[in-house]
Each structure stands twice: as C-alpha cells, then as structure tokens.
Amino acid sequence: MNRFATPWGELALARFPEDPRDQLRAWDASDEYLLRYLAGEELKGIEHPAAVDLSGEVVVVGDRWGALAVALAERRPTQIVDSFLGRSATAANLARNGVAADAVRLLTTRDPVPARIDVLLVRVPKSLALLEDQLHRLAPALHPGTVVVGTGMVTEIHTSTLELFERLVGPTRTSLAVRKARLILATPDPALVRPANPWPHSYPLPDGVGPVSGRTVVNHAGVFCAERLDIGTRFLLGHLPERSGPDRVVDLGCGNGVLGTAAALANPAAEPLFVDESFQAVASAEATFRAALGAERAAEFRVGDGLDGVPSGSADLVLNNPPFHSHQATTDAVAWRMFTGARRVLRPGGELWVVGNRHLGYHVKLRKIFGGCETVAANPKFVILRAVRH
C-alpha cells in the first residue's frame, strides 16, 4: 500500500487483490496530473485559471485502481470500468480511507451510462477499441457545457487517440507532458455527426482450428485479439484433449470464449464455465457460445478474479491462455493466481492445459504447484503444458 497525495488530501491506496510484496502503485503520474488540473492548480503550458466545477454529474471512465474515483468521492462520481479487479480495488480503497461505499456509483462497461454528464474524465485505456466504444456510448450524454478531460502516459496517447476524441466528442487539444503524463482536452460539439459504433465485431473462424472451424466469433470492444484469432489460442485449439462424458470444463481467462466453445462442441455432455475479469470478455464469450450452440445449451458465465468463488474440486478440465501484462507492467502474478486457483477447483485426476510463450517458463510454476507437468506440444514461439491434480 502507498500514500497518494491529492489536492484534497492524502489517500492510502492499493491494487486488488492486495499483495504486500507488490511494489506497483495504484496510481501514476497521469492520475496526479488530472486531479491537479481539476483543482485549478497552475500547470505548465495550460491556460486554466480556475478549478473545474464538480457539482454536477461527474463520470470517471477507465479508472484503473480507483485512484480518481476515491479522490473525488466527496463529489459522488460515477465510475465506469471494464475490469472486475479495478472495480474491486475502488471498493476496497473507499473502505480503506473510511469513505462510504455508496459515495461512488460503480458501473461496468455493460451498464447503461448516465443520461446527462457534466464532467467526463477518461483514463485512456490500452485498447483503442474500448475507448472508441465508450466514447460512442457516452457522447449522447454530453452537452455544450460538459468538461471532457482525458489523461494517460505519453506512451498511451497516440494520434489515433486524439482523432477518436475529435471524431466522437469535438475539437481536441493536448497539454504539454508533465512527468511523462499528458492531458487530452475536448470540447463537445452538439452539431457533430458521428459514425455508427462498429462494436461488437464478429468474424468467422478459419478452417483447421478444430470444432470451431467456420464458427462465428463475437468480440465486444477491448477483448484481446478482437480482429483475429490470436496465435496462442489457435495453437491450443489444434491440440485440445479428446474427452467425453459430463466434464465440467473451465475456460479460464476466457476472452471471447473460443476455447470453451470448442470444448463444448467436441463434447456434447460437457458443462462449460467461462471466467474472465473483463465484463466485455465475458459478454463476448457468451455471444460466441450462443452463436455456436444456441440458447438451450447449459453454460455458466462468470466475471471475477480468476476462480475465486468457484467450488473446490468441482472441475475436470481447465483451459488457460494466461495474460502476462497488467496494464503497462509485465508480471506473472495473474498466471500464478490462475494456476493455484486451477489446482484448487480441479477434482483429483483433473487436468490444467496451458498455452503460453516459451520464454515465460510456466513449466517451473506448474511443477511447484502441481508437483509436475508435461509438454503436450511446442513450436518456436509457444508451448502447451498439461498438469494433473493428484
């Protein structure tokens, strides 16, 4: 946990789930820059003589760990995030600082947006598609007096980012960089004619990828590899285990749900569970699954922190293509939680199948957690590993 100095006081903030060994902060310079701008502090290169009026409807989009929403809690903002971990971090950080849970209205990217927005604050996401979708959904709630401010590190703000604000909100300019952070300042244009929102995006899978060959994949904005089948998943699809009977199959970190859908197509008796921490991903997985198997086929779709809340000893097979980034940080913490969670939920004899980049060394972790693992297949870039719960 670290102390975050804001114009309205100091906050104790942590990421979620909190890990005392984790040195990563729950905020960065772009959060600081935005809050200083809102408070009316004198900033290099910005003509901004007064504090922003925060008495109206304040909406905070993409707040990664709740730093912005908690700092503005007295203004009772609405927070919109796609991340279950980010939403949980906000709730935990409110409690950590003695702020009432209802001080911030917590919405997901799947919820209807407020009808009118007076101040829109956007933490620029890694996914340009997610930003595009969110601006499409939020723009009708803006009015000529709405203050729109985006923020991000200079490595996160590109010409395409600014073009999106310009195309979907109105005239846009940027601030000078301060501590490698930058602000985006947009003025809503009520006469702006916006193009149609291209999300969600669907495409047919190619041949040669097992049971899902030719099937339609549905991708909501922000889902990993929304434009094409990622090569790691494609590799695993070519080596899925052949199973039959009433298996409980978990697609862990499901993304658009291709792996779980393939397992369900290959085994009509399988009972799939799709899990991801992204609300957009789980919505995509459900749409992909229903497109392939219809409304009657039983399946469960869960947004959460890995396998938390899934009963121990309840699964026969876990399929996993784990992420190795948390925003801009490269970390194995997510994979470690996924692997330990998989061991807990697997029945004796149950199997975890993992695909990952060869250089990540997942076999070392799996041997520590499961007592061993075997290589199912490998190519110059990826390896597929199998670990059995004894």
Image (spheres, rainbow, N blue to C red):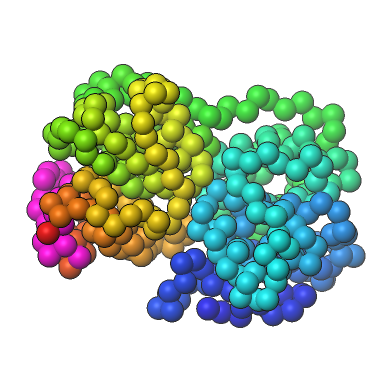
Residue at image position (26%, 60%) is 344
Residue at image position (36%, 53%) is 310
Pick the residue in front: 147 or 347: 347
Left-right relation of 268 to 25: left
> In the rendered view of the protein, which quadrant contains the C terminus?
bottom left
Query: Vertically, is 202 above or below 258?
Result: above
Work out whether residue 244 can be spotted.
Answer: yes
Q: Does the magenta stretch include residue 329?
A: no
Residue at image position (77%, 34%) is 140
Query: Vertically, is 243 above or below 93?
Result: above
Pick the residue in front: 309 or 284: 309
Left-right relation of 144 to 101: right
Pick the residue in front: 162 or 105: 105
Work out whether residue 149 can be spotted.
Answer: no
Residue 225 x %, y %: 41, 38
Left-right relation of 144 to 270: right
Q: Does the magenta stretch include residue 382?
A: yes
- In the image, the segment drawn in magenta is 369-389
Residue 76 x %, y %: 77, 60
- Among the 4 quarters of the image, the one containing residue 66: bottom right
Residue 37 x %, y %: 78, 64
Pick the residue in front: 112 or 385: 112
Residue 105 x %, y %: 70, 55
Residue at image position (52%, 52%) is 83
